[in-house]
Amino acid sequence: MKKILVLNHFPTIWPPTSGGTLRYFYLYKELSHYFDITLLSQSHEHKGGLFQFSPTFREYKVQKDPQYNELTIDSHSRKSSYEIELIKHFELTKQPSSYRKHFKYFYEKSDLIIHESPYLLNYDVYLGLDQKPRIYNSHNHEYTLASQIWKNEYARKYLPALNKLEKKLVTYADLVFATSEAERDDFISVYRINPKKVKLAPNGIHPKPKVRYKKKKNSRPSAFFIGAEYPPNMEAAEFIIHHLAQKCPDIDFKIAGGCCTPFSNIRKANVTLLGRVPHNQKLRLFNEADIAVNPMFTGAGTNLKTLEFLSEGIPLFSTQHGVRGLNLIHSKHYIHADKEDFADKINRTVRDKKLLKYLSYQGQKYVYAKFSWSHIAKSIREEIQKLSF
C-alpha cells in the first residue's frame, strides 16, 4: 500500500465541526481505504503527538513551536488575528522549527506528498529535487481569498509572497485539486498552468437519511447559522445580528461557532449567540432549526456549511456566494437571497410549510447524490493512481 504524507497548518478535531476540519478528516479517512495516510498537522492549544485512527490512517500533531509565539509580526496584529496567524506559519518555515524536523522524518517513509495549502511549502525542501509526486489539495485558491478578505495593511504586504508561494506549488505539483469549476478556472488563468493537471475535489458530506424534528404548533420559527472564527463567517454573523434580526422580529435566530466571538456583548431579544458548541449540540441545533441562513458575501472554495445544512434536510436561504460552486437551483434546492432582499425572502416564505418541505427533500436528495465523501475519495484515488510512484 502506497504511503502518503499530508502537510497542514491546522490539526483535525474529533468530531470535526468546521469546514476545514470536516474536509481534512473525512476526505483522508475515506482515502485511507486505498492508501496508507499520515497527516502531519500543526497543533495549537490541543495535545500533540501521534493519534492512530485506523491501521492505515494516523495523524502526528506537532505542538506549537516556542518560536511561534516569539514572532513579532505587527503591533496591530490583535485586530486581525486571522491573517497574522497565517503569516506566522509562513515565517516559521524559514527557521529550524519542530515541524521541519518531523517533516524530514516522515518524508523518508512516504511515497507521495500532499500540501493542503501553500503556507507550509518551504518545509518541503526536496520539492523539485526528488522523484516523489506532489499534490496540492486546495481548500481555496488562497491568494484570491487573501486578496479579498485580508484587511490588515501590514498583512497585505505579504500578498505578493503568498502569490509566489502558491504559484510555485501549483507549478511543481503533479496534480492540483480544486473545490469547484470556478476555482479550477481561477488556478489555470492566474498561474497559467496546464489545465490537464487541475482536477475537481469538491467538499462533501456523509449521507445519513433521517426524520426531522417536529416542532410544536404555533411556535416561533427559528433560523440557524454556524461558522468558525473566520472573517467571511463573522461578516455573515454581523449581518444576521444587525440586519436580519431587526427586519425579521418574528424569527428567532441562533448563531453558533467561533464567529460569535466579536459579538459576545451584544444582546437582542430574537438572537441567541451560542459560541462554540460540541458535536452533539450542533446536531440538535440542526434538528430543531426551521430554516438555515447563509448570508455569505466573501470567501473562496465551496461552502461546507451549505452542504451540511442541505444534508440535514434544513431549508436553506443563501446568497449566491454561499452556494458558490455547487450548481444549486433557486426555489428547488434553496431560496436565493441578496443582501437587499434577504429579510423579505425569509418573512414571505418561512411559514410556507409546503415549500419548505419541498426544499428540504430536494436539497438533501441533491447533495446525497453529488457530494458524498466516499464518492469524492474514489475520484481522487483514480487520479492519484495515474501518477508514476
Image: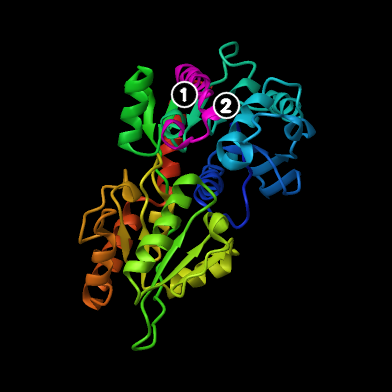
Sooner in the amino-acid sequence: mark 1 or mark 2: 2
**164 and 360: which one is in front?**
164
**372 and 101: which one is in front?**
101
Q: Position of residue 371 (x, y in %)?
A: 37, 50
Q: Position of residue 119 (x, y in %)?
A: 57, 28
At x 38% / y 55%, what residue is drawn?
306
Crowd class of label 1 (few under 14; some 14 to 19; many from 20; radius 10 Å): few
Camera-near label (1 vs 2) is 2
Residue 246: quarter of image: bottom left
The N terminus appears in which quarter of the rendering?
top right
**235 and 14: which one is in front?**
235
Range drawn in magenta: 146-174
For mark 1, what is the residue? Answer: 387
For mark 2, what is the residue? Answer: 112
At x 46% / y 23%, what residue is drawn?
387
Label 2: which secondary element: strand
Say if the magenta span includes residue 383: no
Say if the magenta span includes residue 155: yes
The C terminus appears in which quarter of the rendering?
top right
